[in-house]
Image (cartoon, helix red, strand yellow):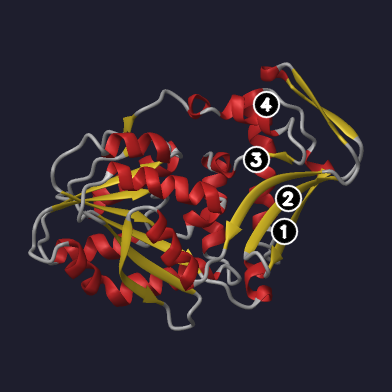
Amino acid sequence: MAVHRNTTSEVAFGMADDVRYGLQQTPKRLSSQFFYDAVGSHLFQQIMHLPEYYLTRSEYEILDNHKADLLRHFAPDQQPFELVELGAGDGLKTKILLRHFLDEQTSFSYVPIDISEDALIDLATSLQKQWPTLNIQPQHDEYFHALEWLSGTSDKRKVVLFLGSNIGNFSPEAAVGFYQQLSDSLRPGDLVLTGFDLQKHPAVILAAYNDRQGVTRAFNLNLLHRLNEELDANFNLAMFDHYPTYCPETGEARSYLVSQKKQTVHIGALDLDVVFDYGEVIHTEISRKFTPKQIQELADATGFSVNATFTDCKGYFVDVIFEKKA
């Protein structure tokens, strides 16, 4: 299965420039999009199966229970459509939909898009083996390049999947900007199925980012290992620790890497020395949790209407269909 590459490497996505900029800010920061090299992708697969990480189980339940309802929304008159997934990962949850759509002899093509080429190749290989007749068109790209690609494809209805509460990794302003670009790339009647992690008891949320096994810690520290490997940095991973927080007032879970001593890190590919004070942090990720009101406001602000909502039995998570307005 050929994977279409819209860039030659993930460094071309701006990794070097992003790292240079982020590590010279106050506070220092690294983009969460660079978590997903081969090691990071593998660690995230482990995270999704941790007992504390309810997000995957909750959304899996929703998709499994409502796959027939979703198909009725996606293809009400059995018209063909393109199923475009942003951040496809291993496709664990999406396979629920693919299996049902194929069983129902639905006319559709599947376009998974991911910044991790390793994850995309694994997914494409797995899908081709499981369903040889599936029309799959893998795209190795980042979201914003993918949005440009979306606007130039066929006239078939587009159903965009943005699952896993990936929208939570955006600031409120960036989320509006992203959905506005997405709206601009779609035609009236096109759909976006988005997974939103809902606000709930703070202890439940914090535990999801602070598992007892330390997998999330390893996932965050691997970001520094990646900089060592790809940008010739000399981070000593033993001198950094992972520190997650959750603020129920803002609905934001944040992850940080904390310098455990005063130290200087050299990044050879950037010819850059980065000085860390003892206790200084690198902000690595934000994961926002939503209220129904915030979800409606996001749709209203970006040219979408809320078509349908589906929740899990605990009310932890919701998948929402946005429809592009005329």
Quadrant assignment for the C terminus: bottom left
Total marks shown come to: 4
Q: Nearer the viewer, residue 242 or 159?
A: 159
Q: Nearer the viewer, mark 2 or mark 3?
A: 2
Residue under label 1: 244
**Pointers 2 and 3 in contact (CB under 8 A)?**
no
What kind of residue is marked 4? Arg
SS category of the residue bearing label 4: helix
Residue 272: % across, % down: 75, 20
Q: In the image, what residue occupies the spot 13% across and 43% down?
A: 155
Residue under label 2: 256
Q: Nearer the viewer, residue 299 or 164?
A: 299
Mark with earlier residue (1, 4): 4
* Residue 163 seen from this side: no
Up-down relation of residue 201 to residue 34 (above or below): below
* Residue 67 seen from this side: yes
Residue under label 4: 20
Q: CA distance from mark 2 to mark 1?
A: 6 Å
Mark with earlier residue (2, 3): 3
Quadrant assignment for the N terminus: top left
Residue under label 3: 223
Left or right? Give the position of 72 relative to 191.
left
What kind of residue is marked 3? Leu
- Which image quarter: residue 35? top right
Residue 22: % across, % down: 68, 34
What kind of residue is marked 1? Pro
